[in-house]
Amino acid sequence: MPDEFHGSSAIDRRRFVKASLLPAVLPVTHVLEDAAAQGAGPVPRGPEIIDSNVHLFEWPFRKLKFDRAEALIAKLRRHRITQAWAGSFEAVFHKQLDAANRRLAEECRTSGAGLLLPIGTVNPAWPDWEEDLRRCHEQHGIRGLRLYPTYHGYTLDHPEFTRLLGETAKRGMLVQVALRLEDERVHHPAIDIPPVNAAPLLDALKKVPSARVQLINSAGPLLGNNVSALVRDTRVAFDIAATEGNGGVGRLIAGTNPSYRGAIPADRLLFGSHAPFFPCESALMKLFESPLSLEQLEQLMRANARRLIG
């Protein structure tokens, strides 16, 4: 990071949050002005935040305010998000995944304004998923996949899932596994989609230790007793989109979150908003109100994401 952002001028967490992160949550210029007047040295530039969990296009069961790319980009930019990894809601429910991936890549290229990074989708339980993977990587220039196991009808102990991890590892691609998209209690009556059981992931990743995997929307009950083993025995990463409670992110790191049995180190956590399904302000507030050090904030906001995507 630039020297003026975290250099020898001793910008501590309080000054950083006041001058940089707070305006990102609630964009107000007087906060910056007050910090400049009261603090010694230059006010740090706004944080560079990478959002690892957004979606484009329409969610079929309710209208989302920022489901158009232009509107979502404007919203993210307002909150100092400089890159967002975008999956496609169409890929959750469409059978023609290559068409969905092609549209996603094109939308990110033409409307993404340099901010949206497309994250494609394949279904390892369907025939010829290898061709969808090849097209994602070679034709559309997609660097990662987002998987929806329960929406697509398979579990993480499916042998083709493990083979998919091996093929993406060869290509240096990231694999994101969405443990849920919305709370099961508010599902439309036409669908019955359970959350993903994360337990088989441990064995799959032991077979493919070079795989880059991130669990998104990984609320505490979805991980159960698996956190300690996943952290100890694999390189899997997580996001903060589904973390709840005051100081929740800090409690994840400390291992004191009542919904998790185990601690998730700061170097395994990525900023993720689940926008536009969730307000992106929600994820920003989780950073602002959690007792995180400046180093931990920097890890969550961008350093971990840059390392994971390669």
Image (spheres, rainbow, N blue to C red):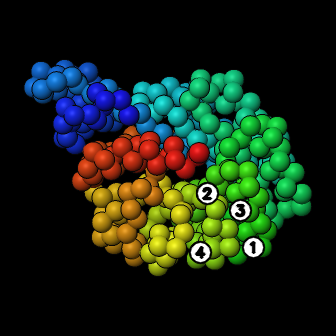
| Residue at 82% in and 37% down | 139
User: Which SS class for mark 1?
Assistant: loop
> Residue 158 bears which disc, if any?
1
Mark 3 belongs to which amino acid? Leu
Disc 3: which residue: 165
Disc 2: which residue: 212
| Residue at 70% in and 57% down | 169
User: Which SS class for mark 4?
Assistant: helix
The residues bearing labels 1 and 2 have C-alpha atoms spaced at a distance of 18 Å
Q: Quadrant of residue 24?
A: top left
Reading the chain from its start, which is encountered first: label 1 or label 3? 1
Single out the mark in the foreground, 1 or 4: 4
Reading the chain from its start, which is encountered first: label 1 or label 4? 1
Q: Quadrant of residue 163?
A: bottom right
Reading the chain from its start, which is encountered first: label 3 or label 2? 3
What is the quadrant of the C terminus in the image?
top right
Q: Residue furthest front?
A: 8
Q: Residue furthest right?
A: 128
The residues bearing labels 1 and 3 have C-alpha atoms spaced at a distance of 11 Å
Reading the chain from its start, which is encountered first: label 1 or label 2? 1
Q: Is residue 35 left or right of residue 63?
A: left
Reading the chain from its start, which is encountered first: label 4 or label 2? 4
- For label 3, the crowd category at 10 Å Cα-Cα, with few meaning under 14, some 14 to 19 and many 20 or more, is many
